């Protein structure tokens, strides 16, 4: 979806090229360049925290993926940069000596193949220590998220950009397959080819590379179980591929017992947010928003709780009153923030400013692009000062236009 949106943004901008500038000409000041755009808001502060450049700074506009700055701030504020997400495992044996592995998911956003392999190796070691060499079935408890929760703004495509969230999910609920000599294979050396991958791969158009697992969360949960099984078998624990879904709190499994094994992700929250910012990963952002909502209002996480959490936490932490956010990634066209609010957020985000990518020389920022929306918010680094700025363009422009405006902001600073 990201590639699709970017292509449309460029296409529409070129179509309207006779009405808009293709770039911000060197002969124009930043105020003159902004003045040629009707639906645009901007704000930049100087080293004294005074407005250096501004245009309609308090007017609400669609923020697109600069919303991820909000989600990252709330997650870092709530958990701290060193937080690690958990997944719990329980093991039971019945009277017939059949062994069941129960998995409780809590929305870890970064269960990629490499992480699941580490998880399986550690779990296998503990299983062998108690004499378990075979798993007869796997039970998944995915009740931490509402079943098939979909946050606003998602489109019904097979693009990775539109992967749905899940309490248990592998590889961002996407598959990356290819054909070699007419045979379906994994396009990633670290990812085994599982039965579900083969099943979905036969139905998919592989010319576009990676694709999501569709709108049924059970597909993602089953894929997680199959990858876990494959890696357990690599570690010497045999697994029968029978997967069931059940709430563990309603069984004897969680009757006061501690987990047999608790896996904590090897990546910290900060180490997850950095690639989320760089690659604008919707899946990570929405997982964070959903998990935050479940911790605030209790599971299961839901779209309604995300909206309530955004309202409550941003009012509490930043004093915002007039705004609207309903997803963590910024896909919704209904979201509304102002440049003033984004700059206030960036002031609070300073402890974690290093998590932002350098989009231009000495410009560290998060971009946002939807059809008819182009945004950029972050810091210009000059003379050891991190000066916050926000650009919100709610009309079609060429894709690179927001970066060109940011460069003009930087030029304005240099010329002072």
Image (cartoon, rainbow, N blue to C red):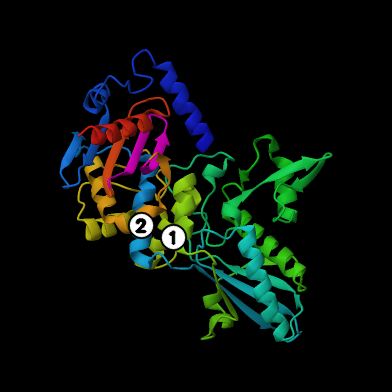
Q: Nearer the viewer, residue 275 or 100?
A: 275
How far from the left and from the top, in percent, is residue 216? 58, 51
Q: Which residue is mark 2?
A: 352
Q: Residue 407 lies in magenta, yes or no?
A: no
Spot the residue most to the right: 181
Tell me, yes or no, if residue 289 can be seen here.
yes
In the rendered structure, which disc, 1 or 2, sits on the residue that comes first in sequence?
A: 1
Residue count near mark 1 (Cα–Cα under 10 Å), binned few <14, some 14–19, many ≥20: many
How far from the left and from the top, in percent, is residue 86? 51, 70
Tell me, yes or no, if residue 323 can be seen here.
no
Secondary structure under the numbered disc 1 in the rendered image = helix
Secondary structure under the numbered disc 2 in the rendered image = helix
How far from the left and from the top, in percent, is residue 270? 44, 60
Magenta-drawn stretch, dominant element (helix, strand or loop) = strand
Residue at 43 percent across and 17 percent down: it is: 15
- Distance, label 1 to label 2, CA atoms, is 8 Å
Q: Which quarter of the figure is the C terminus placed in? A: top left
- Taking 276 as reference, is 218 left or right? right
Q: Nearer the viewer, residue 157 or 63?
A: 63
Spot the residue most to the top: 18
180 over 266 or under it: above or below: above
Q: Which residue is mark 1?
A: 270
* Displayed quadrant of residue 142: bottom right
Q: Residue 368 lies in magenta, yes or no?
A: yes
Q: Looking at the rendered structure, which numbered label has been put on residue 65? A: none
Q: Are marks 1 and 2 in contact (CB under 8 Å)?
A: yes
Residue at 20 percent across and 51 percent down: it is: 321
* Displayed quadrant of residue 122: bottom right
How far from the left and from the top, in percent, is residue 157? 56, 38
- Taking 320 as reference, is 284 left or right? right
Q: Nearer the viewer, residue 96 or 296?
A: 296
The boundaries of the magenta stretch are 362-383
């Amino acid at each position: 979806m990201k590639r699709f949106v970017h292509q449309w943004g460029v296409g529409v901008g070129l179509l309207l090229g006779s009405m808009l500038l293709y770039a911000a000409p060197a002969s124009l000041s930043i105020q003159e360049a902004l003045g040629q755009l009707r639906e645009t808001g901007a704000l930049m502060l100087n080293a004294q925290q005074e407005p250096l450049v501004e245009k309609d700074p308090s007017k609400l506009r669609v923020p697109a993926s600069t919303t991820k700055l909000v989600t990252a701030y709330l997650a870092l504020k709530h958990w701290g940069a060193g937080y690690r997400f958990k997944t719990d495992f329980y093991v039971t044996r019945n009277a017939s000596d059949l062994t069941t592995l129960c998995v409780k998911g809590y929305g870890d956003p970064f269960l990629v193949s490499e992480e699941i392999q580490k998880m399986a190796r550690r779990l296998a070691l503990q299983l062998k220590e108690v004499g378990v060499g075979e798993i007869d079935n796997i039970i998944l408890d995915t009740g931490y998220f509402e079943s098939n929760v979909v946050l606003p703004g998602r489109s019904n495509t097979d693009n990775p950009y539109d992967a749905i969230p899940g309490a248990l999910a592998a590889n961002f609920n996407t598959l990356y397959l290819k054909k070699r000599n007419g045979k379906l294979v994994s396009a990633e050396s670290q990812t085994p080819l599982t039965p579900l991958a083969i099943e979905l791969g036969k139905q998919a158009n592989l010319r576009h590379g990676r694709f999501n697992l569709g709108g049924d969360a059970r597909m993602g949960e089953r894929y997680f179980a199959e990858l876990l099984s494959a890696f357990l078998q690599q570690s010497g624990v045999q697994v029968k591929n029978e997967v069931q879904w059940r709430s563990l709190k309603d069984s004897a499994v969680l009757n006061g017992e501690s987990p047999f094994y608790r896996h904590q992700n090897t990546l910290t929250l900060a180490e997850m947010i950095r690639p989320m910012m760089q690659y604008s990963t919707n899946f990570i952002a929405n997982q964070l928003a959903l998990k935050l909502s479940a911790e605030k209002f209790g599971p299961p996480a839901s779209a309604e709780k995300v909206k309530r959490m955004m309202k409550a936490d941003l009012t509490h932490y930043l004093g915002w009153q007039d705004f609207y956010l309903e997803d963590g990634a910024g896909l919704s066209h209904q979201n509304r923030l102002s440049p003033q609010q984004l700059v206030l957020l960036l002031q609070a985000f300073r402890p974690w400013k290093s998590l932002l990518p350098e989009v231009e020389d000495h410009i560290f920022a998060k971009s946002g692009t939807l059809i008819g929306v182009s945004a950029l918010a972050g810091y210009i680094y000059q003379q050891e000062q991190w000066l916050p700025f926000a650009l919100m363009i709610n009309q079609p422009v060429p894709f690179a236009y927001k970066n060109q405006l940011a460069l003009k902001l930087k030029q304005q600073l240099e010329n002072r």
